[in-house]
């Protein structure tokens, strides 16, 4: 009896989960199918599959809007920010983790306390400062802000990881008179790759998706990032829904593909990152 | 030589952090006491900015209305988002066939930008052509202008928030549940504990740390609410201010609204400082309480 009872309960759970999966995926499915439809088709048969998978809407987005530009801007801002976060973060973490000096604990505290700061609330002084440095309406300014935001958790994660590496490797190399730079680059850092992946993903998603900082700092259309450019685009094509859905689909595509391939890393990175 | 090397390693990170985190943060507190002339703090005005946003009409009305909406958002997310997340996490804990795919699916919208989510649901909630009203028409329920109606606008944005973000608390809570060892659950089951008492007596107390994290992050998230209402109902919190929240009000005060380009950096800074103190203070008190609860239960 208990077995049958268990079976009924399990199918109940499966039905609940399937329903949930439907609620999560159906809106995205409609977004994708709608992107192949014309207005007439969208409004007359909203639930059906598109009559053709012609690429007219995509062509419109590609050629008649600044979409490609927005995409390229987002990509370069994200890549530049991640590289700098990894570079500066690993350097600082390496100093704190692998050398003993008096102020090392103080530096670690300095970075860790940065994790709790909501930088959005300091947006006014940040704006004034960047304006003085001529970095408003400049992608480099945006990158610097993202690097500052990403560094605290990067230093925290990298320090923890670098500390766990054994001392023997480093000491053997020192006996052989390898320079400190060489020891760092060719012995220690290759071992730190897993931690770097976590840092990269944890920062890439919020930077790629960010809307707030570009909204404040970027005003030229040619410098807008994808989420910000999307607001321009949605305003221009208000009456052409097929094109609107195409824009949303194309904007969602890169990160969705990456997520599907690396879902384990994404989930681990994002849930850990927020739990810090 | 050695200290030069260490200094070189630390310098870039320390400089960037000092210039773009520490300095602006300290300035934010200072600016709240100044009146601004364009981008320059012109003269010290004491607590005038704080008095305006907290006590003077019409600013204070706006502040409290926005604050009230943030509180509604927080309560709604705690009950509906985290409540559902808890149920789904418990369902996933059984590790039935396909549970990994379900985890990947529920987390998918979490990686999408709030801008995409906001626009998608804005289109779906369109009164005439939106997916939601179309679907309701199939079962003969008449739809409405979800985002155009003061009584449903805030709820609609909260719904979009839940749809896009529910995967996050689900997987954090699931991880918390999984930390309760299998052996312990087996042992309790052998002692005749049913699902319900297993949940209330063993899993719930032992997963307390993950509940703490979810509560605190939901609180911080609700008070930082900005992107979704900005996209779905505009910077003025339309219709009729029914979706206005502190994030939008702060943005309008500091950077101008759609109808007026008036920027008031002094008042904006005062709002930012108040929000910072409120959120940080509440979080600290809540953490103390929740941590103590973790030990007791």
Image: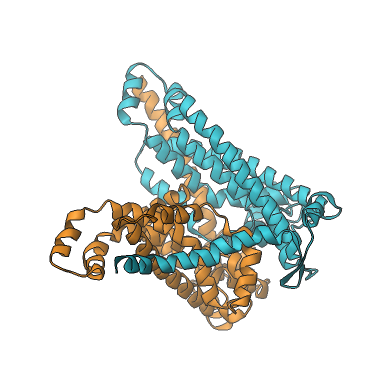
Chain colours: A orange, B cyan
Residue B143, above or below B261? above
Q: Residue at x 63, y 75 (%)?
A: A131
Where is the N terminus of chain A found, in terms of image quarters?
top left
- Residue extending farthest to the right is B57
Question: In this rendering, is residue B39 above or below B56?
Answer: below
Residue B79 visible at all? yes
- Residue B208 rendering spot, x and y as whole percentages: 47, 33
In the image, is residue B104 above or below residue A148? above
Quarter-wise, where is residue B44 in the image? bottom right
Residue B88 placement (x, y as % from top left)? 47, 39
Looking at the image, which is closer to me, B102 or A215?
Answer: A215
Q: As rendered, which of A172 and B243 lies closer to the eye? A: A172
Residue at point 42%, 68% (across, down): B11
Where does the image place residue B82, in percent across and percent down from the top left? 55, 40
Q: Is residue A131 left or right of residue B88?
A: right
Residue B255: percent from left, percent from top? 72, 67
Q: In the image shown, does A239 or B65 lie closer to the viewer?
A: B65
Q: Which residue is painted at 45% across and 43% down in the image?
A: B172
Left or right of residue B149, residue A90 in this image: left
Side of B102 relative to B243 (left or right): left
**Residue A157 falls in image quadrant:** bottom left
Q: Nearer the viewer, residue A171 or A207?
A: A171
Q: Quadrant of residue A127?
A: bottom right
């Amino acid at each position: 009896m208990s077995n049958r009872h268990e079976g009924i309960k399990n199918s109940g759970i499966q039905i609940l989960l399937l329903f949930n999966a439907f609620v999560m995926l159906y809106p995205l499915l409609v977004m994708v199918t709608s992107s192949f439809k014309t207005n007439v088709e969208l409004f007359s048969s909203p639930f059906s599959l598109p009559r053709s998978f012609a690429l007219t809407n995509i062509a419109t987005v590609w050629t008649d809007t600044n979409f490609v530009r927005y995409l390229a801007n987002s990509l370069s801002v994200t890549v530049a920010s991640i590289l700098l976060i990894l570079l500066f973060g690993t350097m600082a973490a390496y100093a704190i983790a692998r050398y003993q000096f008096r102020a090392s604990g103080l530096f670690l505290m300095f970075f860790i306390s940065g994790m709790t700061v909501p930088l959005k609330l300091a947006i006014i002084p940040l704006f004034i400062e960047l304006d003085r440095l001529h970095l408003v309406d400049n992608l480099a300014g945006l990158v610097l802000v993202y690097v500052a935001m990403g560094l605290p958790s990067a230093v925290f994660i990298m320090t923890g990881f670098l500390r766990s590496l054994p001392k023997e490797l480093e000491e053997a190399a020192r006996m052989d008179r390898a320079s400190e730079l060489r020891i760092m680059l060719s012995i220690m850092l290759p071992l730190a790759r897993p931690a770097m992946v976590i840092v990269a993903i944890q920062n890439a998603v919020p930077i790629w998706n960010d809307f707030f900082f570009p909204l404040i700092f970027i005003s030229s259309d040619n410098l807008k990032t994808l989420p910000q450019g999307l607001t321009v685009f949605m305003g221009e094509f208000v009456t052409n829904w097929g094109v609107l859905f195409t824009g949303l689909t194309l904007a969602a595509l890169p990160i969705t593909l990456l997520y599907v391939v690396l879902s384990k890393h994404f989930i681990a990175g994002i849930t850990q990152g927020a739990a810090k | 030589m050695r200290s030069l090397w260490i200094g070189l390693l630390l310098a870039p990170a320390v400089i960037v952090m000092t210039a773009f985190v520490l300095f602006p943060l300290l300035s934010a507190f200072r600016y709240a006491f100044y009146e601004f002339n364009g981008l320059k703090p012109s003269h010290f005005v004491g607590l005038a900015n704080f008095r305006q946003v907290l006590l003077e009409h019409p600013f204070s009305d706006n502040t409290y209305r926005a604050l009230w909406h943030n509180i509604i958002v927080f309560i709604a997310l705690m009950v509906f988002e985290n409540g559902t997340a808890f149920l789904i996490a418990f369902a996933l804990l059984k590790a039935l066939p396909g549970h990994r795919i379900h985890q990947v699916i529920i987390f998918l919208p979490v990686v999408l930008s709030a801008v995409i989510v906001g626009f998608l649901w804005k289109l779906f909630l369109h009164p005439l052509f939106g997916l939601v009203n179309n679907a309701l028409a199939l079962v003969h329920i008449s739809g409405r202008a979800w985002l155009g109606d003061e009584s449903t606008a805030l709820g609609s944005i909260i719904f979009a928030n839940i749809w896009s973000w529910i995967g996050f608390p689900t997987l954090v809570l699931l991880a918390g549940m999984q930390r309760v060892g299998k052996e312990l659950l087996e042992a309790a089951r052998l002692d005749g504990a049913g699902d319900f008492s297993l949940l209330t007596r063993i899993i719930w107390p032992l997963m307390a740390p993950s509940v703490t994290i979810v509560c605190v992050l939901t609180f911080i998230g609700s008070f930082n609410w900005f992107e979704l209402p900005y996209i779905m109902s505009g910077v003025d919190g339309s219709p009729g201010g029914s979706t206005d929240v502190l994030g939008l009000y702060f943005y309008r005060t500091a950077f101008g609204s759609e109808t007026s380009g008036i920027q008031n950096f002094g008042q904006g800074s005062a709002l930012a400082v108040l929000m910072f103190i409120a959120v940080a203070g509440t979080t600290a008190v809540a953490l103390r309480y929740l941590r103590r609860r973790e030990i007791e239960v």
